[in-house]
Amino acid sequence: MFRALWNALAKLSDANPKLYTLVWAAATVVFIILTSLAVASLARLITKLFKKNRLYQQRTFGGYLFASPWIVGFLLFVVVPTALSLYWSLTRYELPNPPQWVGLDNYVKLLTSDPDFRVSLLNSLYMTLFGLPLQLVTSLVLALILYQKMRGERIFRIIFYLPVMLASSTAMLTAWRLVFNPNNGILNLVLRGLGKSFRPASWLIRAVVYVGDLAGSLFAGLQRGNLNTLQSTLAQGFPHVGVVPLWHQSPLWSKPALIIIGVWSSGAMMLIYLAALHGIPSEILEAAKVDGASSWQLFRRIMLPLISPATFYNVVIGIITTLQIFEQSYVLSDSGGPAQSQYFVAYYLYRSTFRFNKVGYGAAMSWVLLLILLLFTFFQFRLSNRWVHYD
């Protein structure tokens, strides 16, 4: 019966796509109504079994009738996929072949003998350790600027928050790819112009490039288990005049480019900090000023501890976000960037599952990533008592 119905729908899709869409929309509405009635009726039956009065049963039916679309959606799109993912992670499931039970083999391979996973995990940790602090500092500075009473404050808020809405869009990431073009990208054109017109700027740019090359080659050496890249960078010596970062074409500068994009789109953290700053009682700040506290003491001793809950929230959410970087790597890099320098865990998970059809292996990777996120979050909550101050 269901196969005949499915074949009929397939024929309808070929014959009249618009009618096919309308049929599926109507079927979805009917499904939502029927499942809502079923869940509400089941809830009322349970209350009846517990011998509740008629009014309680009616209220239970009405409440679950309105809540059941979310309940059914949660079961279908969260609980069931999660259970299937957990099962598939314990199997060798490579489409189009059926899953075969292998137990913990996928997890053992991931954690012991998969060099690509090790590279992707270290790349993700790099973005967390170096990118997240810069985002926090930038967002706090912007929040402090907007905290001052100034004309056009609302306009500046909109301007600073716009990158949050645009950062993950394909069009904006493509524009960033053009900005970071090492030959004729606008960023390197500006750096070359500054280096030619202002001699101290040339020395500063060369020093930044040299430090960036050393740091990137050291990380690549620790990641790969050899220091050949670092030795090569040291042998080349201080960069010559006119040198600029190669950004996405260099394994040493591809991740710093993503960090710049992350800092540019840190407006969400800025809003959290701004709300926390406005939540500080003005009486405390005025009393500190009367006692002779300087601006730095006011910020260090009063404002920073009082906005520590906002910092804690931004740190937790920031770690979760940076460990799941995907769009930037997918759009800006080719197969994970040069020398897999933009090969992050989420990108490796995507390639394993949807490029190579290793559904079971990708499911195991997703559960390992979830465990890592839970561990980071757990330790953050355990350590929060030492530095987070609540009213």
Image: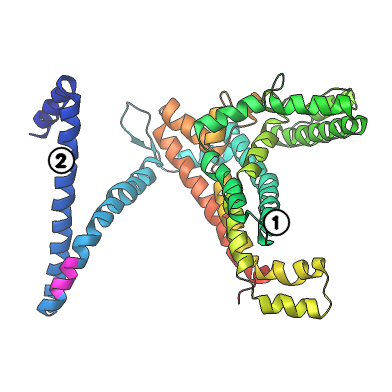
The segment highlighted magenta reads 57-62
Magenta highlight: main SS: helix
Asked if residue 61 is among those painted magenta in the image, a careful observer would answer yes
Quick check: marks 1 and 2 in contact, CB under 8 Å? no
Q: Is residue 382 above or below residue 321?
A: below
Relative placement, left or right, of 145 versus 68 is: right
User: How packed is label 2: few (under 14 Cα within 10 Å), some, or many (20 or more)?
Assistant: few
Nearest the viewer among 344 and 371 is: 344
185 and 323: which is toward the camera: 185
Do we see residue 309 in this rendering?
Answer: no
Q: Which of the labelled discs sits on residue 13, or is there none?
A: none
Residue name at image x 64 percent, y 40 percent: 122
At mark 1, the secondary structure is helix
Specify the farthest residue to the right. Answer: 199
Residue 341, percent across and down?
65, 30
Residue furthest out toward the front: 151
Instruction: Give the answer, above or below, for where 95 lies relative to 167.
Output: above
Instruction: Point out the residue furthest to the left here.
Output: 1
Left or right placement of residue 260 versus residue 294 in this view: left
Looking at the rendered structure, the kind of residue marked 1 is Ile
Residue at x 28%, y 51% (from the top left corner): 73
Q: Is mark 2 on a helix, strand or loop?
A: helix
Residue 141: quarter of image: bottom right
Name the mark on residue 145: 1
Q: According to the image, label 2 marks what residue?
A: 26
The verdict on residue 333 being magenta is no
Write down the quadrant of residue 212 in the picture. top right
Q: Position of residue 118 (x, y in %)?
A: 61, 37
